[in-house]
Amino acid sequence: MRSVFAREGVQEQAAAPLLSWLTWVYPNRPLTEEFDRIIAAGYVKGADLWHLANALFLDPERSGLTFLTLDRRQRQVAARLGFTR
């Protein structure tokens, strides 16, 4: 989101309330297993791979997390992995 706001020229003061509900994910282990599962489901770019890997880390059963993205390919791979939108 910060990248989108920067690209669109949104000032930090205006973005802060919108970002306040986000929680950063800090995995406590390498995400190698998640990366392997994602790569087996289809190709995505590096940052998209990281986004999906963190989602799998947070919800390995894909039962309680809605995966949001505007990227078509990332959305397709997320669906193959079992995420809903």
Image (spheres, rainbow, N blue to C red):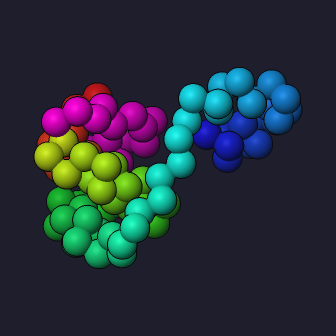
Residue at horizontal 71 percent and vertical 24 percent from the top = 17
| Quadrant position of residue 14 | top right
Could you tell me which residue is drawn at 28 percent across and 35 percent down?
Answer: 65
Queried whether the magenta region covers residue 68, the answer comes back as: yes
Whether residue 16 is situated above or below residue 25 in the rendered picture = above
Q: Position of residue 4 (x, y in %)?
A: 66, 40
In the image, farthest residue toward the front: 28
Is the C terminus in the top left, top right, bottom left or bottom right quadrant?
Answer: top left
The image quadrant that residue 62 belongs to is top left
The rendered magenta stretch, by its main secondary structure, is classed as: loop
Drawn side of residue 85 relative to residue 3, left or right: left
In terms of depth relative to the viewer, which is nearer, 37 or 62? Answer: 62
From this viewpoint, is residue 59 visible?
yes
Seen in the picture, residue 62 relative to 36 is either above or below; the reply is above
In this rendering, position of residue 65 left or right of residue 11: left
Is residue 42 or residue 56 the one in the foreground?
56
x then y, percent, for residue 20: 64, 30
Magenta range is: 63-76
The residue lying at 46 percent from left, 66 percent from top is: 46
Identity of the residue drawn at 42% across and 37% down: 69
x then y, percent, for residue 38:
24, 62
